[in-house]
Amino acid sequence: LLVGAKWGGWFGGSSSSGSGSDSGGEEAEGGSATALLDEARSLMETREWDEAVSKIREARKLDKTAEGLEEMLEKATKEADNALAVKDANDAVVDGKRDEAIKLLSGIADDSVYFEEASLKLKALKEGGDVAVAVADATKVAAADTSGGGSSGSDDEEDTSGGEASED
């Protein structure tokens, strides 16, 4: 899972080798700041953004200087917003509001875990294609991303998205 690997690299993994960032063993009911951030990383890998944000905020109460804390909070918060944008775009399509869906999907940045899904949907919406097919394709992409294997799907399907969303 590439995104999960990035989180480990971006946020320093789960090592606590006596760096002194944990303030003398302070622990809340939920555990140490390091343990809470480890939980948050796991939640982020499974796209449980709201729960991850909650764990990160708990960790911040224990140790405001924990390595990568603010970056994790920013990432989880943005992805929670992106998840909502994708859901709202899907609802807009169902309601026949294609322009609203395009606007929502266009706002998803290329560093988001939802970018490829949004790109496929945008392409279908802008080309007047079958949105249901784009949604099905995007669902396959999302499932591959969360299962950790992009190659577990059918290898004989060709990806024609080019990996970029056009931003007209």
Image (cartoon, rainbow, N blue to C red):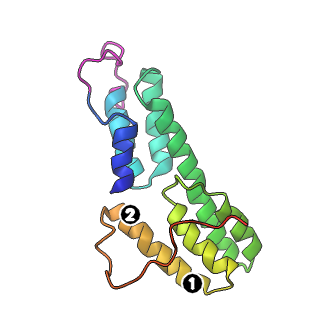
Residue 4's place in the image compared with 145, above or below, is above
The residue that label 1 is drawn on is 132
Q: Work out whether residue 39 can be spotted.
A: no
Is 63 placed left or right of 118 in the picture?
A: left
Q: From the top left corner, tell me how far across and down residue 162 is, in percent.
A: 51, 71
Q: How many marks?
A: 2
Numbered badge on residue 67 = none
Q: Nearer the viewer, residue 39 or 167?
A: 167
Which residues are the magenta region? 16-32
Q: Earlier in the sequence, mark 2 or mark 1?
A: 1
* Quadrant occupied by the N terminus: bottom left
Quadrant housing residue 96:
bottom right
Disc 2 marks a residue whose amino acid type is Asp
Are there few (<14), some (14-19), or many (20+) residues within 10 Å of tag 2? many
Q: Report helix, strand or loop for mark 2.
A: helix
Is 102 placed left or right of 74 in the picture?
A: right
Disc 1 marks a residue whose amino acid type is Ala
What residue appears at the point 38 percent right and 46 percent down from the top-left corner?
6
The residue that label 2 is drawn on is 145
